[in-house]
Amino acid sequence: MYEIAVLTIQLTKITVLILCMLPVIFHAYSATKSSMLNHKFTISKIIRKIPNILEKLTSTQQNKLPKQRLKTAIDHLENKSLERILMAINDLEQIALAHPQYHWVVMEVMTSFVRNNAPYSPQGEVSSGQAVKTRADIQAAVTVIGRRDINKDPKNEQLDLSHTDMQGINLNGANLKQINLYQVNLSGANLSGANLEGAVLSAANLSGANLSLVNLSGAILSAANLSGANLSGANLHRANLYLARLHGAILNETVFNETNLREAQFSG
């Protein structure tokens, strides 16, 4: 009986001890649970921020990358390998498309490249239909200029392709609005459907060029040579053709609304 009584007392003490420990255990559990929830919340916040962090890192890398690519591409324009030059021109165009802040820089690099590598030299008139081969690198550079987004051009700035030789070049549908083309050689060139609104073409050689459906409204063509050029359906609204030569030019449905034709030569 004594042993049973002792065992009963011990069990009672254990029970009381457990009951006393329950609040402590519950509090510890609650604290641990709260900590885990807070920890999960913190992890969740970090996970949600990862795209932003990656975006910032990518943005930083991209800001550095185009500068390096730009410099490398410009350096490659001086290469003697035509393949390297064409690759550089393509890379420069991609930089201009992907990074608008470099758009105008790239276009000025292109015009500078053409001026340096295709300087103007007086040439004889090219008959309509006569094939003239243009250097591949010059064609590529001017093509990039002709398909640029003109909305990214800065105000009151003008691309300069003056005093260049681009005879026989293909610029079908090109956007050459307000570009300086003073005294260029575009004889035999294909400019069909191109936009040359407000362009400066004074003293330019456009003999035998295809200018069908071209927009030359407001363009300056004083003393330009348009002999044998195809101007079918061309828009010459308010263009200045003072002293221009149009011997043998095709003028079917050409718009001469308010055009300055003072002393322009149509025959002789």
Image: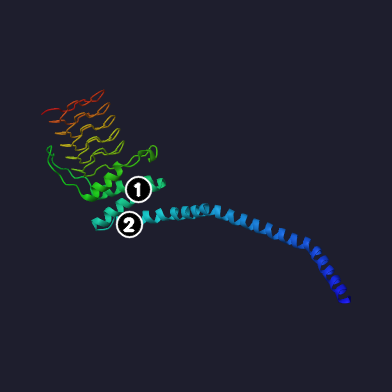
- Dot 2 or dot 1: first in sequence order is 2
* Number of residues whose C-alpha sits closer than 10 Å to that of mark 2, classed few (under 14), some (14–19) or many (20 or more): few
Amino acid identity at mark 1 = Val
Q: Quadrant of residue 125?
A: top left
- Furthest residue in direction front, as rendered: 1
- Furthest residue in direction right, as rendered: 2
Report the residue at 47% width, 52% height from top.
59
Quarter of the image with the N terminus is: bottom right
Q: Position of residue 246 (x, y in %)?
A: 16, 30
- Viewer-nearest residue: 230 or 13: 13
Horizontal relation, residue 76 to residue 211: left or right: right
Can you see residue 54? yes
Quarter of the image with the C terminus is: top left
* Number of residues whose C-alpha sits closer than 10 Å to that of mark 1, classed few (under 14), some (14–19) or many (20 or more): many
Tag 1 residue:
106
Q: Secondary structure at mark 1?
A: helix
In the image, residue 134 sits, relative to residue 224, either above or below, namely: below
Q: Position of residue 62 (x, y in %)?
A: 43, 53
Tag 2 residue:
75
In the image, residue 185 sits, relative to residue 71, either above or below, namely: above
Q: CA distance from mark 2 to mark 1?
A: 13 Å
Color theme of the render: rainbow
- Furthest residue in direction top, as rendered: 258
Report the residue at 55% width, 55% height from top.
47
In the image, residue 75 sits, relative to residue 186, either above or below, namely: below
Q: Position of residue 247 (x, y in %)?
A: 13, 30
Amino acid identity at mark 2 = Asp
